Structure formats: structure tokens, C-alpha cells
Image (cartoon, rainbow, N blue to C red):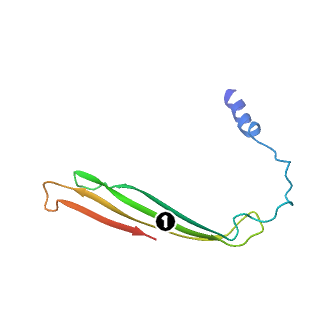
Amino acid sequence: MKKLIFTFFLIFGLTQFNLGQGTDINTNNNLSRTYVITLGGGVTIAKADYPSTKLGSLFKSSFEYNFPSSSSVTFGIKLFGARGVFNGEDRIGVTKEFQTPFWYI
């Protein structure tokens, strides 16, 4: 019974009706004709057969353009990519340290 009451609360209790705003007031989409540039960075950890791993770096970026639209749906194109490095070391083997760069677009 508690699950049924909880389910009805989720379905009907959290539903809100927004009748204060009409749909014909603003027909321009705020995202139309916009450019978006994002930049980000991070840390990589390699899971390899080397006993010790070292932290590497990661850099990500993207560029996006949204085409003009007067509806609530926009269409756009996005180009994104990243570049980073995986690192690790071994004191016993022939190759003492490895550093593997990677990138994607």
C-alpha cells in the first residue's frame, strides 16, 4: 500500500501545471544563431600491465553552432575533440617508463 501511495505521489504530486505563460508571447528561440565554445581538462590513469601507474593529463574542447529557429527545437552542429597522455612505470622490465599520447575528434 505504501508503494502505491508513493507511486501516486510521484505521478500526480510532483506534476505542475504552468498556466501563467502563453505559448504565443515569445516565438524566438534563445539558442538560435549562437556559437558555443567549451574547454576542459582532467586527469588520466592508465590501467596497464605495468605495476605502477602515473597520472596523465587530458584536455578537451568543443565548438558548436545552432542554426536559426523560431520553434522550441533547435538544430545545430558540434565539433569536439580531446588530447591526453597515459603514463606508467616499471622498475624491473626493459621499458622502464611508458608515455602514450592519444587524441580524438
Residue 76 lies, in percent from the top left, at 64, 70
Identified at 70% across, 68% down, the residue is 32
Viewer-nearest residue: 33 or 94? 33
From the viewer's side, name the closer residue of 49 and 66.
66
Instruction: Report which quarter residue 26 is drawn in.
Output: bottom right
50 relative position to 83: left or right: left
Give the vertical position of 79 relative to 48 (above or below).
below
88 relative to 77 in the view: left or right: left
At which x and y percent is residue 46? 31, 56
Taking 84 as reference, is 67 above or below it? Answer: below
| 100 shown above or below 43 | below
Residue plotted at (50% across, 62% down):
39
Residue 73 occupies which quadrant of the picture?
bottom right
Camera-nearest residue between 87 and 7: 87
The amino acid at mark 1 is Ser
* Residue in the picture at 22% in, 51% down: 51
Q: Where is mark 1, residue-wise? A: 61
Query: Quadrant location of the N terminus?
Result: top right
